[in-house]
């Protein structure tokens, strides 16, 4: 088969709706994931910002643009569903869930359009998704771009996040994460990737578990962190009041300050985590005003870290490769109950690439270009 035809056949196959199970396709740019779509997906309807206060309301098949304030705000309502929605937000949050248990967000693409060309956002509150005081929220198949953070959870236990694709987060401090858990116990993040370009992004930690217990993070790729203080994944359990974090099958690359940390941590397991090609020299992170951060990472290129007061820290079957500071791989070794790591080359997991139902509609409605299909 002609390579051009094969490529377009693969794209079409990955875009076609699945009536029962999602499709998972491995393409040149990563894993393309398509959520279950109806046989004939509806086109998107354009709308301005919306506020939801009714229990059980379903918002779907919309393209929502906000140039001031939140694009979608859910307040004091339970069992709300936001599905197959594209969001462009500036001057507020993309989707805000406030005191609204059991909300479901699925099949969404959210872009903060107010981000500067490079460097930090003008405010810490410009998150793509903000969940506050809401239990049992589910977020599935979400692409998040240029928010202060991608997902910020505050006082929101048992949030489950699956198939999350993140790009170019902008802070400023203390935001900048793909996901920030804050006082949000028993959370789950799985099947995810985050890519922060060195030239434009302004992250802190890529994933931060702050004052939250029994959080699970698994099957992900973390690519890029130009912060002098931030790391790929970190627990901040503090004073033993919080405990429990499991991180497994997560890869990290191009980290500056560190990869997998417990600062402090209590009952924390890093299992089958891998990291490579960390960066010791200054990354010259650009601020929005054009100034440049001249300092290198504050840890001098540490890879695995545990603050000395940590307890119950386990590093299991971990790998690292091409360390920029080969004598600065682990600190503090005395804080680990189990320390099992090797220096070995490996191939990274591919990033997540999400395909949405409305893109299926647009692709199927678009006339095929004869040259692309090999037709003379």
Image (cartoon, helix red, strand yellow):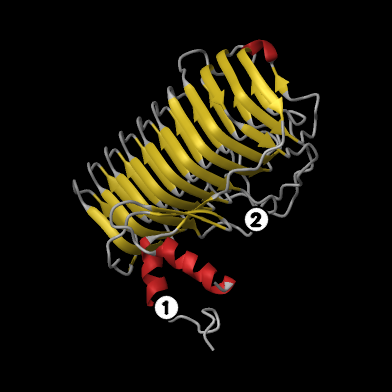
Spot the residue most to the left.
55
Residue at 70%, 53% (x, y): give it: 199
Question: Front-most of 298 and 122?
Answer: 298
Mark 1 and mark 2: Cα distance apart in space: 34 Å
Residue at 56%, 35% (x, y): give it: 250
| Residue underneath mark 2 | 118
Label 1 environment density (alpha carbons within 10 Å; few <14, some 14–19, many ≥20): few
Say which mark, if any, is on residue 217.
none
Q: Are marks 1 and 2 in contact (CB under 8 Å)?
A: no
167 sits to left or right of 356: right
Q: Secondary structure at mark 1?
A: loop
Say which mark, if any, is on residue 366.
1
On the image, the x and y values in percent for residue 300 come to: 77, 30
Question: Front-most of 346 and 302?
Answer: 346
Residue 47 in view: yes
Q: Is residue 3 above or below residue 244?
A: below
């Amino acid at each position: 088969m002609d390579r051009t035809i094969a490529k377009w056949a693969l794209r079409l196959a990955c875009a076609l709706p699945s009536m029962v199970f999602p499709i998972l396709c491995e393409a040149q740019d990563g894993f393309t994931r398509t959520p279950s779509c109806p046989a004939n997906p509806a086109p998107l309807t354009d709308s301005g910002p919306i506020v939801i206060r009714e229990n059980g309301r379903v918002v779907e098949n919309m393209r929502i643009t906000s140039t001031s304030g939140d694009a979608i705000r859910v307040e004091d309502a339970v069992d709300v569903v936001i599905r197959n929605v594209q969001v462009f937000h500036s001057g507020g949050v993309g989707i805000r869930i406030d005191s609204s248990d059991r909300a479901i967000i699925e099949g969404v693409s959210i872009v903060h359009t107010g981000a500067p060309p490079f460097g930090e956002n003008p405010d810490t509150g410009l998150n793509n998704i903000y969940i506050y005081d809401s239990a049992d929220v589910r977020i599935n198949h979400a692409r998040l771009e240029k928010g202060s953070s991608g997902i910020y959870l505050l006082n929101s236990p048992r949030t489950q996040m699956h198939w999350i694709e993140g790009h170019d987060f902008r802070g400023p401090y203390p935001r900048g994460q793909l996901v920030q858990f804050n006082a949000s116990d028993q959370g789950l993040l799985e099947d995810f990737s985050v890519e922060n370009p060195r030239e434009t992004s302004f992250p802190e930690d890529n994933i931060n578990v702050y004052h939250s217990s029994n959080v699970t993070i698994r099957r992900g790729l973390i690519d890029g962190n130009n912060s002098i203080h931030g790391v790929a994944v970190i627990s901040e359990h503090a004073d033993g009041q919080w405990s429990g974090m499991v991180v497994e099958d997560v890869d990290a690359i191009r980290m500056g300050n560190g990869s997998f940390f417990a600062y402090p941590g209590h009952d924390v397991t890093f299992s089958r985590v891998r990291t490579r090609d960390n960066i010791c020299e200054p990354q010259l992170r650009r601020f929005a005003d054009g100034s440049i951060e001249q300092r290198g990472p504050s840890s001098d290129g540490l890879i695995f870290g545990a603050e000395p007061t940590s307890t119950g820290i386990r590093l299991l079957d971990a790998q690292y490769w091409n360390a920029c500071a080969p004598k600065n791989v682990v600190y503090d070794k005395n804080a680990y109950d189990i320390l099992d790591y090797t220096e070995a080359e490996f191939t990274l997991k591919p990033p997540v690439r999400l395909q949405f139902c409305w893109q299926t509609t647009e692709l199927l409605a678009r006339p095929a270009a004869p040259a692309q299909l090999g037709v003379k």
